[in-house]
Image (tube, rainbow, N blue to C red):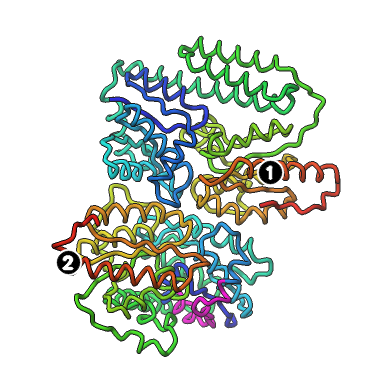
């Protein structure tokens, strides 16, 4: 079978699984086109191609798809995320993503909409061999699968060692001016802030106006949900687990970082995000129990840089003062 | 133990009867009002859906009236409704109320939690166990009877000659049901209600437009949440078929899984279960189109995830099957005037569309 151009949108769950799929498809002998980091043009395309009530990450996903369609790809890889072996599922918008995409664009290349329901290693292999049979009957499946797994494991290890996706996987890298931006001004006392939220909001530097970089510039030590090893996060239990994979991650990471004694938490959420209405409230109650400050940043397509700057600076200033005079200040303002 | 329960549509008399016969002191929450919603909105997360806010407000009102226990249902997602109980508990405890929330989880998926909840519920019963089946059976009969009477009222209202008469008579019927407890009384109340309803003067020569009402169960069933859309439409002379009635829904979902037809209809457009009533909304639209309805109105709480999924697929369904679909998203900001205007415009459009047999008019209103 001849080599095909396969498009992968750099958006939504690909922030968690891009290394796996990018390696897998290219090892099968296809040309993999990964859409670039989100930009204004993609956001605009996304908005004009989707219904108004969707949250901004899904609109951005539409934008990435539209970009890839323009790149004349032969096929788009938009799997239906159902279960990644964590005994929870995804937001309904993820569950119906292939259909939503199909109904939003009239002229579409082939949509590879495999159902990703992998409750064990074997399931993932089965899924991969199905894809291989359909898309690369000539080559074997074992080598690409193994390489993809290695890439993914390596990516996850790097994330838990404290790196961010753009430091851990080339496809996520920002512009080359990146290195100087990571310069950390040391500020006393050192603050550690947990930036929690879904990977596609926390790491998409376009939509969140680069919150992480800003915090680092302010001399803050930033930790995220992906930096926690899975088994440590899984030690935490809720009285009833949430239904959504990423929301569970957010709440449980919140519990973990609060136990680790972070100075404060910034929760990044999206306008009208359904699961976050629940997860956010739980974070709020948790922070209240621990007496830790929480800042909720709600993003949408109108979010301006300046507003975010002001709020972050105010939050950091507040934390610092609180940190310094903690013994003299009442916890309740 | 003073117990209360979620208020939804016409079901309160049924829950009141069941719980009080088991031996509880039942606090029936007042019907949802502006005050209920304001209370709920104040303490609920901003983007929680409107059923969550109304229920929270209604629990707070019931607590004011002396309730100390709330019985509610759980779920398995991915719709948020399955997590309502947990979060309501968190919020109420945070506000400093010492209330017990008993959450009845689906028996097959969470057997232990289900049994625990049932045990808690039956701990303070004042009747022997053998009486329970009869109590539940009569509750069930009553629920079915109420739904039957309500359905009949919806068949009559578009044809009524004196506007508002059906609503008036229906309210009387509900009062009768409120006190009917034994099998004979329920039967009697049903007969009386049907007789009263059929005595309403009607003009059967009308040929009303037919609209299907689909969407999320709470906003479809609770007139306060949807600004009484169904009655408004019927008083404009439209025959409205509502996709959800509580008794039927319970039969199809909790007891047996019998919604094959709807699922099969939705299959070409959405093959995955997306929680809530997302897939049903698609399937029902397809069925309404096949049955020759003039249009479909989707009711959904603002930020309801399954219904947003449905909404982004519905324009495609609408184009393919040539049936107009209008979506109304409802939240605490929704104004009655806005709803009325949109309903009138939609009905006007459907009327013109019917007159103009070719049906070349634009067919998606949002």
Q: In which quarter of the image is the N terminus of chain A?
A: bottom right
Q: In this view, does B74 lie above or below A267?
A: above
Image coordinates of residue A244 in percent, x first then y, are: 40, 56
Q: Quadrant of the C terminus of chain A?
A: bottom left
Q: Is residue B127 left or right of residue A308?
A: left
Asked which secondary structure carries label 1, the reply is helix
The residue sitting at 30% across, 86% down in the picture is A183
Mark 2 residue crowding within 10 angstroms, few (<14) / some (14–19) / many (20+): few
Chain of the residue under the numbered disc 1 shown in the image: B
The residue sitting at 65% across, 70% down in the picture is A108
The residue identified by callout 1 is B341
Residue A24 in magenta? yes
Mark 1 residue crowding within 10 angstroms, few (<14) / some (14–19) / many (20+): few
Q: Is residue B267 above or below residue A71?
A: above
Which range of residues does the magenta coloring cover? Answer: A21-43
Q: In which image quadrant can residue B237 be found? A: top right
Q: In this view, does B71 lie to the left or right of B358?
A: left
Q: In which image quadrant can residue A193 be found? A: bottom left
Numbered mark located on residue A325 in the image: 2
The residue sitting at 37% across, 17% down in the picture is B21
Q: In this view, does B177 lie above or below B98?
A: above
Image coordinates of residue B176 in percent, x first then y, are: 53, 14
Number of numbered discs visible in the structure rendering: 2
């Amino acid at each position: 079978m001849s080599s095909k151009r396969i498009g992968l949108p750099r958006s939504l769950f690909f922030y968690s699984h891009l290394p796996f799929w990018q390696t897998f498809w290219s090892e099968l002998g296809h040309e993999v086109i990964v859409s670039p980091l989100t930009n204004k043009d993609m956001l605009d395309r996304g908005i004009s191609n989707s219904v108004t009530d969707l949250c901004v990450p899904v609109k951005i996903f539409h934008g990435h798809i539209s970009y890839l369609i323009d790149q004349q790809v032969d096929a788009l890889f938009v799997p239906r995320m159902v279960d990644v072996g964590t005994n929870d599922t995804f937001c309904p918008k993820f569950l119906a993503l292939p259909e939503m995409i199909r109904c939003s664009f009239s002229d579409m290349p082939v949509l590879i909409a495999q159902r990703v329901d992998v409750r064990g290693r074997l399931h993932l292999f089965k899924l991969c061999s199905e894809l291989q049979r359909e898309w690369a009957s000539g080559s074997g499946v074992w080598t690409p699968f193994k390489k993809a797994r290695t890439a993914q494991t390596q990516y996850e290890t790097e994330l838990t060692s404290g790196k961010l996706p753009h430091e851990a996987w080339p496809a996520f890298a920002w512009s080359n001016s990146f290195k100087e931006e990571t310069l950390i001004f040391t500020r006393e006392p050192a603050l550690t802030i947990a930036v929690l939220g879904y990977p596609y909001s926390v790491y998409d530097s376009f939509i969140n106006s680069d919150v992480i970089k800003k915090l680092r510039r302010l001399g803050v030590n930033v930790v995220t949900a992906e930096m926690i090893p899975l088994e440590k996060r899984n030690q935490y239990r809720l009285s009833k687990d949430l239904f959504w994979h990423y929301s569970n991650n957010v709440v449980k990471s919140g519990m973990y970082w609060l136990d680790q004694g972070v100075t404060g938490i910034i929760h990044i959420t999206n306008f009208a995000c359904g699961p976050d209405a629940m997860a956010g409230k739980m974070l709020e109650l948790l922070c209240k129990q621990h007496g830790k400050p929480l800042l909720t940043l709600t993003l949408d397509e109108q979010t301006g840089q300046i507003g975010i700057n002001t709020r972050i600076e105010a939050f950091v200033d507040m934390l610092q003062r609180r940190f310094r005079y903690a013994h003299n200040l009442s916890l309740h303002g | 133990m003073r117990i209360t329960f979620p208020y939804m549509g016409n079901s309160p008399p049924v829950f009141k009867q069941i719980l009080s016969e088991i031996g509880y002191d039942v606090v029936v929450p007042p019907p949802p009002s502006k005050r209920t919603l304001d209370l709920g909105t104040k303490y609920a997360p901003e983007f929680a859906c409107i059923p969550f806010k109304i229920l929270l407000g209604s629990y707070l009102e019931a607590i004011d009236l002396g309730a100390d226990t709330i019985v509610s249902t759980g779920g398995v997602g991915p719709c948020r409704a399955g997590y309502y109980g947990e979060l309501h508990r968190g919020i109420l405890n945070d506000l400093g109320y010492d209330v017990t929330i008993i959450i009845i989880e689906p028996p097959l998926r969470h057997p232990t939690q289900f049994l625990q909840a049932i045990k808690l519920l039956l701990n303070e019963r004042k009747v022997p166990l053998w009486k329970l089946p009869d109590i539940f059976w009569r509750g069930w009969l009553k629920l079915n009877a109420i739904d039957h009477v309500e359905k009949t009222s919806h068949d009559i209202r578009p044809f009524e000659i004196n506007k508002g008469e059906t609503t008036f008579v229906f309210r009387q019927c509900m009062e009768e049901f409120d006190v009917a407890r034994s099998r004979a009384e329920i039967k009697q109340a049903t007969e009386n209600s049907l007789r009263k309803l059929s005595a309403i003067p009607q003009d059967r020569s009308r040929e009303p437009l037919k609209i299907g009402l689909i969407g999320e169960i709470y906003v479809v069933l609770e007139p306060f949440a949807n600004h009484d859309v169904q009655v408004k439409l019927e008083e404009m002379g439209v025959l409205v078929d509502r996709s959800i009635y509580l008794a039927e829904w319970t039969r199809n979902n909790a007891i047996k899984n019998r919604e094959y037809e709807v699922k099969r209809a939705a299959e070409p457009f959405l093959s995955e279960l997306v929680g809530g009533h997302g897939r049903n909304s698609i399937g029902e639209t397809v069925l309404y189109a096949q049955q020759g309805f003039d249009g479909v109105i989707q009711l959904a709480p603002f930020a309801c995830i399954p219904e947003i999924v449905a909404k982004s697929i519905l324009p495609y369904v609408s184009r393919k099957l040539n049936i107009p679909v209008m979506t109304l998203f409802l939240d605490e900001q929704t104004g009655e005037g806005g709803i009325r205007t949109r309903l009138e415009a939609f009905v006007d459009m459907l009327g013109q569309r019917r007159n103009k047999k070719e049906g070349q008019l634009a067919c998606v209103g949002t």
